[in-house]
């Protein structure tokens, strides 16, 4: 997905030199921008409800906690400082065992999600299926979005899109200013034109190829099916009924425009954790009402034919653990077997190379084992 966004006149004075492409912000721009998206770009509000799902404080002493990375014994402070962490919260059995903020953030700070939003879109598609807006995940995309007819998407299903296995060619290299993810146009109709012109290079369902452009198609698909915008549907189906503590927002293409389906819900860290709890509970609300179809989260966290590490916009990490991941270090990590959710806000110096990801994995796995 192209997140090449022009800053609005409300940009903070000290950020007058803000670059137009969020993927290439400087470290200082990242901290100010990730926390202040609503002041810089058009967003649509996601209102909180009257009820907040309780996260009971049960903070433990982690001063003696250590994890190993590259042959070194490291502390939580080492991780937070070296990995530009803005916040980390670890929850087990609905109790906050650890919570820490940095980079000027606190429990009330919103932070951009990047591709964590994809996992939310997956759950919203599940909600729409339960609500009867889709017949099944085998529905053809072009039945809802006829603007895509005549290209590589004529035979692509909702399931193919959710599994990143459409077979349509796409380059997701965030470090390449000429990649599809960097140059694909904003605006729904221009994006449709761009995507319709991409060639089909593999049999649908057989080859995994991470494609943020298609998650914007997924967002448009969802809007077409429900006849509403994504933020309002999220607010009505999950945000308010599950009990998110704070209001949030979703980045839109322009004033009064549509949301980016592949990116950019802006919320507090605790509410990211509650998204994880909603998924862990299988999409069941505190009152026992099921928002998602029976088995939806099981299907969502089952390996696809194209790649055993991916489901329906969820990364599968082994032993039943799965995660919503966003570039620059955003994460919701979920272990249903131990009833653990860990959420991270970060501002990595790049979108995420193997060194950063391996370091995060070492920290998260050690922290979860210690909870």
Image (cartoon, rainbow, N blue to C red):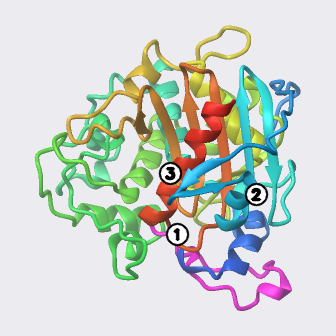
What secondary structure is the magenta-colored segment mainly? loop
- The answer to whether any part of residue 1 appears in the image is no
Q: Position of residue 96 (x, y in %)?
A: 80, 31
Residue topped by disc 1:
3
Q: Quadrant of the C terminus?
A: top right
In magenta, the rendered stretch is 1-22
Does the magenta run of residues contain 201? no
Instruction: Identify the secondary structure beneath mark 1.
Output: loop
Say if 346 sits above or below 61 in the image.
below
The local crowd at label 1, few if under 14, some if 14 to 19, many if 20 or more residues have their Cα within 10 Å, is many
Location of the N terminus by quadrant is bottom left
SS type, badge 3? loop
Calculate the distance from the C-alpha at mark 3 to the C-alpha at mark 1: 11 Å
Q: Which residue is mark 3?
A: 261
Residue under numbered circle 2? 77
Which mark is on residue 17? none
Kindly state the secondary structure of the residue where label 2 is placed.
Answer: helix
Up/down of 285 relative to 245, above or below: above
Q: Is residue 147 left or right of residue 46?
A: left
């Amino acid at each position: 997905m192209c997140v090449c966004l022009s800053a609005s006149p409300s940009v903070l004075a000290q950020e007058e030199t803000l670059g137009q492409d969020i993927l290439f912000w400087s470290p200082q721009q990242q901290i100010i921008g990730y926390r202040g998206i609503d002041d810089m770009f058009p967003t649509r509000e996601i209102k909180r409800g009257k009820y907040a799902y309780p996260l009971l404080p049960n903070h433990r002493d982690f001063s003696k906690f250590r994890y190993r990375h590259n042959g070194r014994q490291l502390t939580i402070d080492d991780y937070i400082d070296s990995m530009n962490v803005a916040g980390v919260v670890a929850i087990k059995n609905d109790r906050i065992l650890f919570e820490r903020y940095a980079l000027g953030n606190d429990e009330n700070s919103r932070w951009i999600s990047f591709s964590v939003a994809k996992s939310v879109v997956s759950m919203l598609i599940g909600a729409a299926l339960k609500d009867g807006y889709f017949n099944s995940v085998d529905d053809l995309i072009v039945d809802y979005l006829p603007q895509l007819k005549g290209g590589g998407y004529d035979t692509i299903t909702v399931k193919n899109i959710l599994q990143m296995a459409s077979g349509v060619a796409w380059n997701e290299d965030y470090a390449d200013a000429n990649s599809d993810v960097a140059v694909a146009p904003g605006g729904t109709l221009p994006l449709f034109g761009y995507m319709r012109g991409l060639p089909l290079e593999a049999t649908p369902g057989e080859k995994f190829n991470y494609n943020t452009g298609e998650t914007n198609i997924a967002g448009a698909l969802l809007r077409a099916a429900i006849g509403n915008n994504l933020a309002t549907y999220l607010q009505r189906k999950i945000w308010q009924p599950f009990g998110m503590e704070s209001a949030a927002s979703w980045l839109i293409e322009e004033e009064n425009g549509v949301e980016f389906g592949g990116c950019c819900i802006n919320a507090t860290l605790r509410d990211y954790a509650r998204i994880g709890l909603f998924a862990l509970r299988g999409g069941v609300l505190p009152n026992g009402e099921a928002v998602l179809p029976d088995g939806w989260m099981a299907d969502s966290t089952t390996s696809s034919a194209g790649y055993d590490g991916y489901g329906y916009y969820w990364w599968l990490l082994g032993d039943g653990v799965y995660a919503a991941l966003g570039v620059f270090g955003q994460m919701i990590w979920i272990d249903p077997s131990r009833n653990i959710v860990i959420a991270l806000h970060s501002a990595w110096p790049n979108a995420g190379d193997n060194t950063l990801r391996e370091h995060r994995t070492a920290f998260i796995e050690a922290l979860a084992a210690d909870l």
